[in-house]
Image (cartoon, rainbow, N blue to C red):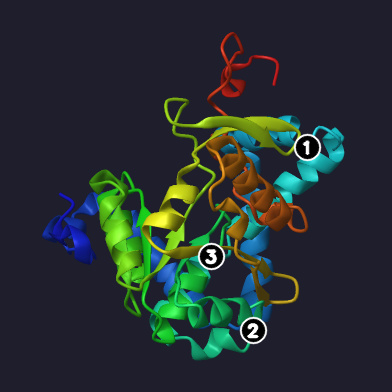
Amino acid sequence: MHQEKNKNEGFIPRFQKSFLYPRYWLIWFSIMLLIVSAYVPARIRDPFWASLGRLVGKFAKGARRRARINLCYCMPQLDEKKREKLIDDMFAAAAQPMVILAELYLRGTKSLCSRVHWHGREIWDDVQKQGRNIILLVPHGWMIDIPFMLLAAEGKPVAGMFHHQRNPLIDYLWNRTRLRFGGRIHSREGGIKPFISSVRQGFWGGYLPDEDYGNDQSEFVDFFATYKATLPTLGRLMKICNAAIVPMFSVYDYNKHRFDIYIRPPMDDLTGADDAYVARRVNEEIETLITPNPEHYAWILKFIKTRKHGEIQPYLRKDL
């Protein structure tokens, strides 16, 4: 079902006639709603989608429970009231990116760029002057795709890795949107070599560092108030790709209709470091990026499922 033109050239989404079958009509109806919303001024639509997100969050029992468990482990200093408010705010933030993606796809960058504020873009200029490639360390924020689309629209070559969605129509629409202004996307099923090839060719690579891939190749290192299994891959990628690892995180303030993209200095201290140090530095950068705006992080993910021997998996606990 998923088609590749060439592994090194990235995944190419293909339309299928079956997408017109009745079983997909509800999705197409939702797309029409997004299309209409894309032409509504942000000051009107943002409060609506935030309220809708909060409402959906009340009924999304599984996702809400995962967020609650993650916050209990990572931010135990929050009392129940503050934790539940953070989760409500997270769902409000989670409702925004689909509309913004629709806006970008249909209207281009002009309407959004006036609301975008980059912080630290000069860091990229310095890296390129040094003749190094760029790998952007990007935690799972809700606005994760937007900066890459904006960079592609500027003519920057960008490449990223992604997981296929279970629903083939959603998978097609999402990836077609990601490629609206160019760039490459590599399916994780194809391994990391095509991504490495793209970065070595000069593409700005987007690397998501916070997923849990088990303990086989991971290091158990601190993550907020708990720990997580973290891949130390970035140290090797930096060397193989002759790349600077530059952390980046995006925040959309739906109250002010303002998009802020934060860029931090390169993680040059990873050179020659051991795996435990690399893994911990990755988590430190994630913490630094997320802490000012925790509601914009996808706390619903199972990123602390792998535990040390003898410990119960957090998401299997009956008391949380």
- Per the image, label 2 sits on a secondary structure element best described as loop
- Per the image, label 3 sits on a secondary structure element best described as helix
Residue 195 rendering spot, x and y as whole percentages: 32, 58
Residue 169 rendering spot, x and y as whole percentages: 27, 56
Rendering quarter of residue 181: bottom left
**Amino acid at the residue labelled 3:** Pro
Q: Residue 97 carries which label?
A: 3
Label 1: how many Cα within 10 Å (few below 14, some 14–19, many 20+): some
Question: Distance from label 1 to label 2 (Cα)?
Answer: 31 Å
Residue 93 rendering spot, x and y as whole percentages: 64, 59
**In the picture shown, does residue 248 fall above or below 90?**
below
Would residue 270 be visible to someone looking at this image?
Answer: yes
Residue named by callout 1: 75
Marks 2 and 3 close (CB-CB < 8 Å) = no
- Per the image, label 1 sits on a secondary structure element best described as loop
**In the picture shown, does residue 139 fall above or below 315?**
below
Q: Residue 115 carries which label?
A: 2
Would residue 54 be visible to someone looking at this image?
Answer: no
**In the picture shown, does residue 36 fall above or below 273?**
below
**Amino acid at the residue labelled 1:** Met
Mark closer to the observer (3, 1): 1
Label 3: how many Cα within 10 Å (few below 14, some 14–19, many 20+): some
**For marks 3 and 1 on the same chain, the one whose residue lies earlier in the sequence:** 1
In the drawing, does residue 20 fall left or right of residue 240? left
